[in-house]
Structures are given as C-alpha cells and as structure tokens.
Image (spheres, rainbow, N blue to C red):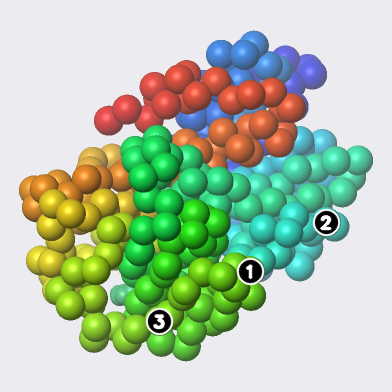
C-alpha cells in the first residue's frame, strides 16, 4: 500500500522493463512491513544528470543502476565506496541528506552466489572469466578476494588487459593474466575449476556463448553464468548436461539486491521472501 509517507526507490536503466529488481525489492519491503516502494525508471543516457538530480529533488531513498549506465553515473556521485571506484561502476545509490553515495554490490552478489552453491570449496582454485565489462570487473574482484588465480579472455584484448591491470593493483598477490579470444579452447579450460560467462552473450537478442567454449565443459567444472532470464540459459543447460556444477545469475541478482536493501533500510534483507518471487 502506497501512503503519504512512502519512501521511493527505483532502478535506472535502458531498457529496464525486463528487470526483476522491482518485484524482488517490493517483496522484501512487504515482508518487513516497510513503508517503501520500488519502481522501474527508464532513463536514456542523455538524461542521466537530470535523473540523478531528480532522485534528490523527489526525496528518493536511493536507486539501483543497471545496463548501460553503471559507469556513466559515477562522476555524479558525491561520495564513492572504494569498491565502486575500483571497478568504475555504481549499481547502488543511497541518497543521504541530499548527497548521492555510490556503491557496487555486484561484487557481494558474486561472492554470495558462489558461497551458496559451493561453500568455500572454490577458495584458491583457478578460474576463467570470459568478458571484461562491468559485470566481469565485479566478478574478477570477488574471485581475487577468494585468492583464485585468474585467466581473463575478452573479445577486445585491450579491455581484458585493463582488467588484469585492475586486479594486479587491487590484489597483487593473486596471479592474473589475459589470453586472446582465440584461446577459448580445451587447453585453456582444462586447468580451470570455475568458468564464468561475464559477457552479454546468452541474453535475449544477443549472440550465443561460443561453441568452442561450451564443448570443453566437463564434470570437473563449476560453471557460473552472470546472464539470467526467464528460463535457465542455454550455456548453463549445456554445462549441466556435461556434468558440470552450475551457478545461476539469479543467485548473484539476489545477493547484490540483499546488500543494496541493507544499505537503504539498515535492516537484514528478508532473503526467502525476495528469492520466492524469482523462482521460475
Ligand atoms: P558490458 O559492460 O557492456 O560488457 C559486455 C561484455 O560482453 C564485454 O566483455 C563485451 O566484450 C562482451 N561482449 C558483448 N558482445 C559480445 C560478442 N558478440 N562476442 C563476444 N563478447 C561480447 O555489460 P555488463 O554490465 O558487464 O553486463 C554483462 C551481463 O551481465 C549482462 O547480461 C547483465 O545483465 C549481466 N549482469 C548480471 C548481474 C546479476 O546480478 N546476475 C549483474 C550485473 C550484470 P567487448 O569488450 O569486446 O565489447
């Protein structure tokens, strides 16, 4: 029930209609009886400054930021959490006393998803990350904090190298290298415990994860797809058929949302209520 005192939150993206965040956060507010409501906010790139000013002017408590604006909002933050600065991406904004505070809770989302599926068994194990964009940077930092030696493969080699540089600065003790896209072969995946698709491949309307990678998956792999949709992704379905253990992008979505919820409300997120609305 929206009342005269309801605090508003929202998600800024383009597109945004597909987002599961409104249903998830509203379920969380309802479970705790909080007088808060969360709405989709379709914002074009040119309107980012006005939209952020609008959050303050309209008394919003905060917002999530999604594709493609996570980097674009960064310069408009009055304060940045170190993790958001490191990965150069803000996915959660808290409005405090007319100031915009930028966080990145995707890193916690990755940690949460892997811990739920595998406990601490991945700590120190080698990982291959395919992709080097915003999601991949959050994945790489989360894995580096689990002391996992990293191999990064991205279509654009220079972006992969920038991510290697980021990890070497943030976690100098963790081995981290990049390989060219042509090296997505059995020889590269054979030595890996975890394989992550952190590209947009597999999203509706995007291309497919390359067959060269899919065909190398085995029962010895844990396969994590950051992409999520209304059904299991084809990449995860194929991984499961190969005997690999799979980790769904929805678990990361829940983990990052729980962390954002706690920043906005100061209360522990009601995970069960929020997970229930994500069940396919
Ligand atoms: P992004 O910053 O735009 O990065 C896109 C990545 O995909 C880049 O590495 C890009 O490579 C690669 N890519 C795009 N098209 C490709 C193609 N045709 N062939 C090979 N590589 C291609 O996007 P993002 O923010 O990282 O988002 C990536 C995905 O993660 C999206 O599906 C998003 O919804 C998802 N995500 C999920 C969660 C969650 O909670 N589960 C959280 C955040 C993001 P280049 O560098 O060569 O362009």
- In the figure, residue 155 lies in which quadrant? bottom left
Look at the numbered disc 2 and give the secondary structure of its residue.
Answer: strand
**How many callouts does the rendering have?**
3
Q: Cβ(mark 3) to ligand 1 < 8 Å? A: no
Q: Is residue 264 visible?
A: yes
Residue found at x 76% / y 37% = 60
Report the side of 259 relative to 139 (left or right).
right
The residue at which mark 1 appears reads as: 170
Disc 3 versus disc 2: nearer the observer: 3
The residue at which mark 2 appears reads as: 79
Disc 2 + disc 1, Cβ < 8 Å: no
Determine the CA span between mark 1 and mark 3.
Answer: 16 Å
Q: Cβ(mark 2) to ligand 1 < 8 Å? A: no
Determine the CA span between mark 2 and mark 1.
Answer: 20 Å
Q: Earlier in the sequence, mark 1 or mark 3?
A: 1
Residue farthest toward the right in the current orientation of the protein: 97
Residue found at x 69% / y 23% = 267
Residue found at x 21% / y 65% = 208
The residue at which mark 3 appears reads as: 178
């Amino acid at each position: 029930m929206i009342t005269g005192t309801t605090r508003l939150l929202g998600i800024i993206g383009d597109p945004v209609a597909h987002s599961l965040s409104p249903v998830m956060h509203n379920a969380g507010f309802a479970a705790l009886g909080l007088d808060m409501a969360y709405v989709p906010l379709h914002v074009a790139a040119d309107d980012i400054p006005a939209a952020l000013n609008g959050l303050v002017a309209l008394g919003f408590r905060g917002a999530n930021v999604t594709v493609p604006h996570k980097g674009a909002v960064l310069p408009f933050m009055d304060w940045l959490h170190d993790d958001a600065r490191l990965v150069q991406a803000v996915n959660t904004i808290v409005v405090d006393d007319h100031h915009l505070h930028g966080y990145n809770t995707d890193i916690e989302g990755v940690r949460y998803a892997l811990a739920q599926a595998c406990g601490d068994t991945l700590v120190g194990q080698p990982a291959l990350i395919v992709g080097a964009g915003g999601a991949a940077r959050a994945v790489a930092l989360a894995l580096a904090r689990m002391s996992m030696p990293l191999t990064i493969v991205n279509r654009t080699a220079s972006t992969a190298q920038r991510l290697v540089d980021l990890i070497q600065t943030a976690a100098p003790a963790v081995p981290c290298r990049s390989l060219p896209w042509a090296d997505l072969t059995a020889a590269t995946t054979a030595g890996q415990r975890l394989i992550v698709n952190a590209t947009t491949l597999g999203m509706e309307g995007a291309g497919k994860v390359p067959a060269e990678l899919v065909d190398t998956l085995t029962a010895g792999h844990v396969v994590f797809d950051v992409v999520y949709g209304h059904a299991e992704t084809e990449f995860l379905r194929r991984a499961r058929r190969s005997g690999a253990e799979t980790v769904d992008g929805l678990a990361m979505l829940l983990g990052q949302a729980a962390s954002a919820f706690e920043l906005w409300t100061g209360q522990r997120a009601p995970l069960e209520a929020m997970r229930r609305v994500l069940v396919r």
